[in-house]
Amino acid sequence: MSTGLIFDIKKFAINDGPGIRLTVFFKGCNLQCKWCHNPESMSPKVQKMYNAKKCIGALSCIEICPNDALKMTSEGVVTDYNVCNLCGKCTEVCPTKAFEMLGSEIPVSALMKKIDNEAIFFDQSGGGVTFSGGEPLMHSEYLLEALKACGKRMYHRVVDTTAFSKLETVLEVAKHTELFLIDLKVMDSEKHKEFTGVGNEKILSNIIELAKTNCEIIFRIPLIKGVNTLEKNILQTALFINSLEGNRSIINLLPYHPIAENKHLKLGNSTNFMSFETPSTNEIKEIISIFKKQGITATIGG
């Protein structure tokens, strides 16, 4: 039985598919979106977060560290990652939980126990399980095992993905998934590569083939002012959606929010944070109007 590196399991999720859901967040992503609101999901390795606001200077973390990797400074406890082996002992003794380990190997059997505990909420609300990230398709063996186990229990299954993967992986996952939530970030491939680290040719071609299976897809568009909010990109996005097989007439718009800044600080990589602007209310209304003219209903959130 395979294991997957998971950094969070969120109960009572209401924005990751229909009904009340349990959302499983995988660690690791093959895109590096500069606006990502979950920067802790990007690395495929275990990481450590430190919240200086929670630190009370108890020093128990420094005393227990086997490698002397921690040092108290005027800005709180600093970790020397050249010697830190991410053993997690500092997180175990911190009285205020200022330290937090991100990423744990969870067998599918253990995950299913957590999922089964929420089944009553699925039944009452028409909910189910959503696999998100990071990028769940990076963990395809584990993902497929979990999807099949959920299918045997008749749980509704959603995969929240960038669609950046091998086509055979996407199509195999589609056989065991009721709904895909797929981000369409920007249509110009060079611009896509500038802001995410990869071009979008594979993503778009995978979506075209996935649409041929008649599986349900809801597209989500993060609205980043100056990146993908201009009329040309919105129109190209609408035309692409309309070119796909099947009915894809509903999309979700996700206006940018600077929530990630504090997370980058906690991860100790604040220099990686890049601030963007949120489009104005009028700009969002215009975007909704462009989609509407193309027969697509765009709603905020989802």
Image (cartoon, rainbow, N blue to C red):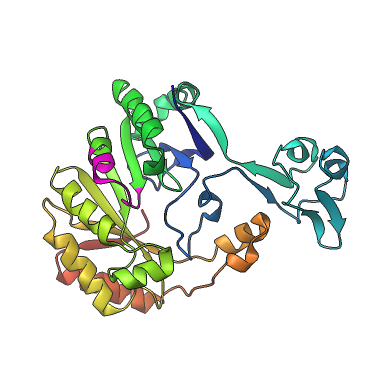
Image quadrant in which you'd find residue 136: top left
Residue at image x 72%, y 45%?
99
- Give the residues in magenta: 161-171
- Say which quadrant the N terminus sits in: top left
Q: Is residue 53 above or below residue 45?
A: below
The x and y percentages for residue 192 are 35, 68
Q: Which residue occupies 30% across, 62% down?
A: 200
Instruction: Work out whether residue 27 or residue 218 is closer to the camera in this orientation and state it.
Output: 27
Numbered circles on residues, count: 0
Residue at screen point 51% across, 38% down: 6
Give the residue drawn at x 13%, y 47%: 212
Figure quadrant of residue 258: bottom right
Q: Is residue 52 left or right of residue 187?
A: right
> In the drawing, does residue 196 fall left or right of residue 261?
left
Q: Residue furthest front?
A: 82
112 versus 78 height, above or below: above
**Is residue 101 visible in the rendered structure shown here?**
yes
Does any portion of residue 223 appear in the rendered image? no
Where residue 155 sits in the image (x, y, percent)?
32, 28
Residue 105 appears at what percent x and percent y? 54, 32
